[in-house]
Image (tube, coloured by chain):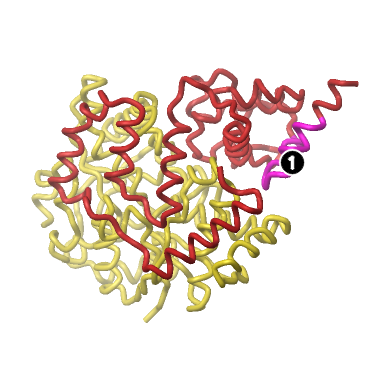
C-alpha cells in the first residue's frame, strides 16, 4: 500500500464541477492499492489568475497548503494540472528567491505556520504511471476497452513548464496508459496545445477558436472520444462543445473523459461510481459496448 | 541620458519580480511569438513586449492588451533558447499594470482575475457564484446567454449552490496570513 496526501483543488472538491474526476480517482486508487488522504482544511491554490493580480498573496495561498501538507511527510498528489503547476512553481521559487521566501515566511508566521520546502507535489497521472506502473494496471483490467479510439489530450500545465515526468511537447504517458487498458490511442497532433484555459470566461470567442482546433484535430484522426487530465480542459472541451458547434457550424459529439474514468471502466467499476453521466456530451453511444 | 535612466528604472522594477530578471537575456529571436497560440490577438507580440520593456516603454507595455491574452500554456517558456521565464514576465506585466492603473480597457480579463482572486482569498473558488458575479459585472446579456450552459451543468450535478468552506480557525489563519502579506507589499 502506498500513501499520499491528496489535494483535490476546488474543481475536484465535492462541490466542484469536476467531482467525477475526484470520484474516479478515488475509485481507481482502491483497485490499484494506494491511499489518498485528503489534506485537512486546504484552501484554493490561487491558480494562475491570483498570481497575475497579487503575486505575493498568491504565493502565500499556495504555501499555506504546502505547510499543512508538510506535517504528514508524504508526497502531495493533485489531479488538477493548474494546482500541480502552482505548487511546483511555488516550491521552485521559494528555493530560488530568498527575498520572496522571507516575505512568505513572515506572512505564514502570522498564521502560526512554517514551511520548510520539503513537500514533493505530483500529478495523479505521474503517480499512476510511475509509482503503480503500466504492468500493474494491466493486471487489474477486467473489461479491456477494445476498439475504443481515444484521443490523448494532455493540455498544457501537466507537461509545461515541466516538473519532470514527461516531455513538454510530445509526451507519451497517456498513449501507454490507454494501451494498458486495452484502448487505442489515436494520433493527436494538438495533444499539448492549449484549450483556451480560463479565457473561456472572459474572452469566449478567442478560447472557442482554440477548443475548436482541438475538436477538429481529434475528430479528423478518427477519435470516438477524448481523454483529459485536467478539470478545466474537460470543461472547455465538454461543456463548451455545443458553443463550438454553434459558432463554427460543426457537429462534434465527442465525449470527454478523465483518464481515471476510463481506467475505472476497464477495471469493471460501475459507471455511476465514476461519474460517467456527468459529462455534458453523452457517452452512451460511445461506451455502449463497455459499460 | 534621461532615456537611459528611464530604461534602467523599468527593467530594474521587472527584475525585482521573481522570474523577471531573465528579461535581460533576450536575443529577440521571436521563438516565443512563433509559439504563442494567441499572438495574433495581441497588439504587441510577446517578443515585441520584451523589446519595448527593455527600451523603457513602461506605459506602452503596461497598457498593452498582450499579457491579458496570455493563456499560461508555457509553450514560450519551454521553447525559449535563453531560458527566459516568458510566462512569468507576462504575469509580472499583468500585476504591474494593475498596480499602475494602466490596465487595457477593452479586455475584461483583469476584472475576471481580480474576482477570481477575491474568492481564492476566502479559501475556495465557488464556480457558480464566481461566474454569475463576473457576467453580471461585465456583460449581463452574456449571463442571460449562459443560462442553457449553466442549466446543463446543474442538471449533470456539476454546479453547486452551496460552496465549500474552510473551518473557522483555518479561515482566520488564512486571513491573518494574507493581511500580513498585504503589509509586506502584497495585495492589489
**x then y, percent, for residue B184:** 66, 53
Give the letter of the red chain. B
Q: Is residue B56 above or below residue A225?
A: above
Q: Is residue A44 magenta?
A: no
**x then y, percent, for residue A128:** 38, 65
**x then y, percent, for residue B116:** 42, 43
Q: Residue at x 62, y 57 (%)?
A: A92
Q: Which residue is mark 1?
A: B15
> Is most of the magenta stretch helix, strand or loop?
helix
Q: Is residue B14 magenta?
A: yes
**x then y, percent, for residue B162:** 23, 55
Task: Pick whichever, A19 or A166, lies toward us.
Answer: A19
Stretch of the chain drawn in magenta: B8-25
Residue A201's image quarter? top left
Task: Pick whichever, A149 or B164, lies toward us.
Answer: B164
Residue A220's image quarter? top left
Task: Pick whichever, B77 or A112, lies toward us.
Answer: A112
Q: Is residue A215 above or below residue A127?
A: above
Chain containing mark 1: B
Q: Is residue A189 visible?
A: no
Task: Pick whichever, B124 or B154, lies toward us.
Answer: B124
**Dot 1 surroundings within 10 Å: few (below 14), some, or many (20 or more)?**
some
Give the letter of the yellow chain. A
Amino acid at each position: 500500500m502506498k500513501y499520499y496526501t491528496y489535494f483535490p483543488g476546488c474543481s475536484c472538491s465535492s462541490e466542484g464541477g469536476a467531482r467525477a474526476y475526484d470520484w474516479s480517482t478515488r475509485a481507481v486508487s482502491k483497485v490499484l492499492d494506494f491511499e489518498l488522504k485528503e489534506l485537512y482544511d486546504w484552501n484554493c491554490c490561487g491558480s494562475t489568475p491570483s498570481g497575475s493580480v497579487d503575486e505575493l498573496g498568491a504565493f502565500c495561498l499556495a504555501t499555506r497548503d504546502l505547510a499543512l501538507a508538510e506535517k504528514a511527510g508524504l508526497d502531495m498528489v493533485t489531479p488538477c494540472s493548474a494546482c500541480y503547476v502552482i505548487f511546483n512553481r511555488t516550491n521552485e521559487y521559494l528555493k530560488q528567491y530568498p527575498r520572496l521566501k522571507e516575505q512568505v515566511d513572515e506572512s505564514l508566521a502570522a498564521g502560526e505556520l512554517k514551511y520548510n520546502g520539503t513537500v514533493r507535489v505530483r500529478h495523479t497521472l505521474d503517480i499512476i504511471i510511475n509509482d503503480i506502473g503500466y504492468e500493474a494496471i494491466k493486471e487489474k483490467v477486467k473489461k479491456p476497452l477494445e476498439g475504443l479510439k481515444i484521443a490523448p489530450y494532455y493540455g498544457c500545465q501537466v507537461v509545461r513548464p515541466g516538473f519532470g515526468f514527461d516531455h513538454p511537447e510530445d509526451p507519451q504517458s497517456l498513449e501507454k496508459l490507454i494501451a494498458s487498458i486495452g484502448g487505442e490511442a489515436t494520433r493527436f497532433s494538438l495533444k499539448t496545445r492549449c484549450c483556451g484555459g480560463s479565457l473561456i470566461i472572459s474572452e469566449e470567442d478567442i478560447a472557442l477558436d482554440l477548443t475548436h482546433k482541438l475538436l477538429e484535430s481529434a475528430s479528423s484522426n478518427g477519435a470516438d472520444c477524448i481523454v483529459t487530465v485536467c478539470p478545466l480542459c474537460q470543461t472547455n472541451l465538454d461543456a463548451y462543445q455545443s458553443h463550438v458547434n454553434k459558432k463554427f457550424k460543426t457537429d462534434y459529439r465527442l465525449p470527454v473523459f478523465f483518464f481515471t474514468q476510463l481506467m475505472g471502466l476497464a477495471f469493471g467499476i460501475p459507471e455511476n461510481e465514476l461519474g460517467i453521466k456527468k459529462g455534458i456530451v453523452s457517452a452512451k453511444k460511445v461506451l455502449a459496448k463497455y459499460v | 541620458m534621461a532615456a537611459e535612466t528611464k530604461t534602467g528604472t523599468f527593467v530594474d522594477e521587472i527584475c525585482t519580480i521573481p522570474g523577471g530578471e531573465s528579461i535581460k537575456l533576450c536575443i529577440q529571436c521571436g521563438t516565443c511569438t512563433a509559439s504563442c497560440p494567441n499572438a495574433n490577438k495581441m497588439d504587441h507580440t510577446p517578443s515585441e513586449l520584451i523589446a519595448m520593456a527593455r527600451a523603457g516603454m513602461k506605459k506602452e507595455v503596461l497598457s498593452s492588451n498582450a499579457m491579458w491574452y496570455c493563456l499560461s500554456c508555457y509553450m514560450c517558456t519551454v521553447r525559449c533558447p535563453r531560458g527566459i521565464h516568458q510566462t512569468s514576465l507576462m504575469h509580472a506585466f499583468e500585476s504591474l499594470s494593475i498596480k499602475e492603473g494602466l490596465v487595457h480597457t477593452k479586455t475584461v480579463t483583469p476584472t475576471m482575475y481580480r474576482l477570481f482572486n477575491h474568492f481564492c482569498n476566502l479559501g475556495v473558488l465557488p464556480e457558480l457564484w464566481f461566474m454569475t458575479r463576473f457576467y453580471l459585472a461585465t456583460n449581463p446579456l452574456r449571463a442571460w446567454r449562459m443560462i442553457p450552459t449553466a442549466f446543463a451543468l446543474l442538471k449533470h450535478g456539476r454546479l453547486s449552490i452551496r460552496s465549500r468552506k474552510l473551518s473557522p480557525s483555518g479561515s482566520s489563519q488564512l486571513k491573518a496570513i494574507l493581511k500580513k502579506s498585504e503589509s509586506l507589499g502584497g495585495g492589489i
